[in-house]
Amino acid sequence: MKIKRITTVEGLDALKESWIQLENIKGNSTIFQSWNWNRIWCEQLIDNGRGWYLNVRVVEDNHGQVLAILPFCEQHLLLHALKITHYLGHHMSYGNDILLADANSPELAREVVNLTLNDLDSRTIIHLRHLNSNSLFTKELLDRGLAYTHCPRVLIRADSNITDQSTRLGRSRRKSFRLAENRLKRKGNIKYRICAGEDFPDAFEEMIRLHKLRFASQGRATMLEDENLIFLRLAASKLSEEKLSEIIELRLGDKILASALMARYEDRYYFIQGGFDPDYSRFSPMRLLLTETMRRGFDELNCGVYDTGPGYEKYKYDWKHFVDTNYFACSSGPGLYAKLLARIYHILFLKNLPPIP
């Protein structure tokens, strides 16, 4: 086996066919490993003058057959004295992994990890966030003591015995859910609207407006700025064209109270982003809306898992759920300099993580 690096967008485009072949292997990827997700991110990342560089690794056998694709990029700091390897789109992805020609081969995952670590130089740190717990690549890093707990990931499984998704709420939560719903109904007609196709662009902008309004009301900063926002707008629009993403709104008459960007990939329904009007927070609009998105995901789209993403928000634990774990990996190339910087970076990363409710 050998490893090579792709450092140009042109080189990446030449890899598209192989990437999609690996992406389509069952059990090999989530929406965050898809070609579209990563290729669109490159448009916002590369050559932006902020020290980000494309650095996808490709593992091949001796005949040039692609065995693995590692969707990486590099951040150069301190006048290129320090290079940090990240996943492409790591700020917006919460189930990161590599692509393997055999998704069920621990031996292949082991060799890929060996090649990846041996490929690091004395100025490079590898820092991979939100690693998928089901990945053989992640498990190999855990076995070597190179991966650590990042955050919980809150998931909800389909249950054919449940016909009313609000029953997943605990007794007190369910009671407050009904009270909020009834109070809102007394104010007017409430309805849920699915926005796709030509309705999607305007609905996306309204979702972003509500997202920022909610964060501002709480005195919090949002990551949906600059290239992150541009990327999400482009990626969501592309997925919408392929009927893989949609926005669901909660409306009171013509007024939009809450909005959620959802994505479907294989048997999962992902909650990507959302927002609500804080003036209506007493009516629990986000809880009402997410309960409706669960109904749609399970009953209409026949998804097996509803993925709420990282468990940093308390409301995600309201429904009967199970908790998976996202991991992060932090390692370095050879030499005391790289190892010391990796240790410092590790400590600072943990220090800046949001609290878990």
Image (cartoon, helix red, strand yellow):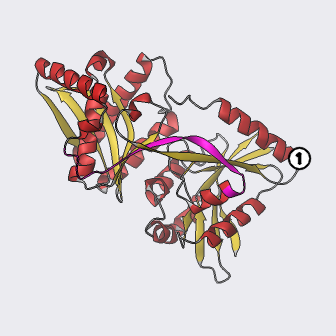
The percent position of residue 154, horizontal first and vertical second, equals: 44, 42
Q: Quadrant of the N terminus?
A: bottom right
Label 1: state its secondary structure.
helix
Residue 8's quadrant in the figure? bottom right
Residue found 34% across the figure and 40% down from its top:
261
Residue 208's quadrant in the figure? top left
Figure check: 172 above or below 25: above
Q: Please give left or right for residue 138 compared with residue 36 in the image.
A: right
Q: How many callouts does the rendering have?
A: 1
Q: What range of the chain is rendered magenta?
A: 143-163
Q: Nearer the viewer, residue 77 or 190?
A: 190
Q: Please give left or right for residue 254 compared with residue 224 in the image.
A: left
Figure check: 1 above or below 109: below
Residue 336 at least partly seen: yes
Q: Amino acid at mark 1?
A: Leu
The residue that label 1 is drawn on is: 336
Residue 355: say if magenta: no
For this orientation, the residue located farthest to the right is 336
